Amino acid sequence: MHIAWLGKKSPFCGNVTYGREITNALLDRDYQVSFLHFSQEETDLTHSPDCKEVALPFLYKSQIYTIPTLKSSKVLMDALAKLKPDVVHGSLTLSTLDFQLPEICQALKLPLIATFHPPFDSKLRNLKSSTQFLTYQLYAPFLAHYDKVIIFSRLQQELLMKLGVDKHKLAIIPNGVDTVKYSPGISYLKSHIKAKRLFVYVGRIATEKNVEALLKAWKQVDMGNYSKLLIVGDGPLKPSLEALYGRKNNIYWSGFVADEQKRIDILRAADVFILPSLVEGLSLSLLEAMACGVACIATDAGADGEVLENGAGVVLDTQGVTTQLKTLLPLFRDHSEITQLLGHKARQRVLDKYSLTNNVSQVEKVYEEVLGRANFSVVSHLP
């Protein structure tokens, strides 16, 4: 089966990781994969002999959205006509091509699947979540024209159904983690920074991630000299926050870590992973920490609370995060038995529900379902 994957390869974000992990897994299962993504290159890009890459022209792209050029839709249509895939899978990039893709695929008679990533807070408790809700309102009518839409959680399903998307169009397939690669193991990071207890945040340093709520709680509690907080990531708020919260508070800033093995080493060293976001989709960083056997604290933004429910971690309300963490941080510092128990439960939750192997198998079933419907439609219209 030939899959034409429309997604992102840069800049680094959850969508990039999702596309890389799923397409590599499909290649491992002997699928033919073509990767169409926004790039400044004028010609086809070659990632490997097994995966043909096609460059789509753009004016601007960020971790959040992309602005294509006027000719990008023609480049996309010509590429799909030439590739003749069995299925087109759009890992939606928040660009205008997302809205044009159904029309293009209908003209070429190609089955079309979407993965819909935008973060959300289903309780709409803050301004940022209201902005995200507008994204869902904008996309809902167009998602009806896709053959199937992959989403990450039942909360996302409920939100889209309220906005008029038929339930049969939606397939809940959570993000998945390679549980062999992301697993408990030895790391020397704690001894390197002289930490007895290591608390870690991994993600963008941006308003919606609410990192300052964690930093304020850490500074106000005074966690002592042997508890360290490591902030991994980059973003618009990093310079100002790093100036206010630094080594004198036992807070370390690593910036963005591109090397995957180094990120795994950080997670293996961690005692506690904290995600204080105001809005989320389903955090891959959270799942990766859980797979490494780290005790996790996260807000109930997006599907993260759903991942940790029933004892797999501690779930915070998105309101009053600093106050909640001021209570929890000393508890997790002083009671290693709690972090060990929650780390074991977190790992088991990922093995049970969020492994990459299971994720890809479910995606395969969606391909088979959509192709089966398409073939039936063709046969039923034959004289």
Image: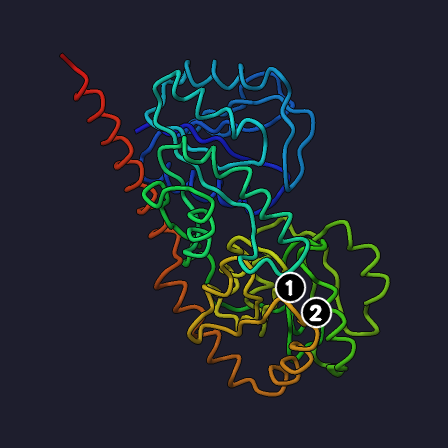
What's the residue type where badge 1 is placed?
Answer: Tyr
Query: Residue 76 location in percent, x, y?
Result: 51, 19
The residue where tag 1 is placed is: 201
Q: Quadrant of the C terminus?
A: top left
Secondary structure beneath dot 1 equals: strand
Q: Residue furthest left?
A: 383
Q: Identify which residue, 185 or 131, lies in the foreground.
A: 131
What residue is shown at x 56% (from left), y 36% (from top)? 93
Is the residue 12 above or below the residue 42 in the image?
below
Are the two marked residues, 2 and 1, in contact with CB atoms closer than 8 angstroms? yes
Q: Is residue 287 above or below residue 346?
A: above
Q: Which residue lies at the image location 70% right of the left edge and 62% below the top edge? A: 211
For residue 55, side relative to residue 211 (left or right): left
Residue at 57% from the left image edge and 67% from the top image edge: 298
Indicate the position of residue 133 as horizontal and vertical percent values.
Answer: 58, 48
Which circle marks residue 82 in the picture? none
Q: Name the foreground residue: 189 vs 39.
A: 39
Amino acid under disc 2: Leu
Badge nearest the viewer, 2 or 1? 2
Label whose residue precedes the other's in the sequence (2 or 1) = 1
Q: Is residue 326 toward the left or the right of residue 121 in the image?
A: right
Quickly name the residue at label 2.
Answer: 214
- Where residue 85 appears, as percent x and y from the top left, is 36, 23
Q: Is mark 2 on a helix, strand or loop?
A: helix
Say which residue appears at 71% left-offset and 53% top-offset: 206
Rounded to the nearest whole Å, what is the CA distance between mark 2 and mark 1?
Answer: 9 Å
Crowdedness near tag 2: few (<14), some (14–19) or many (≥20) residues, C-alpha within 10 Å: many
| Quadrant location of the N terminus in the rendered image | top left
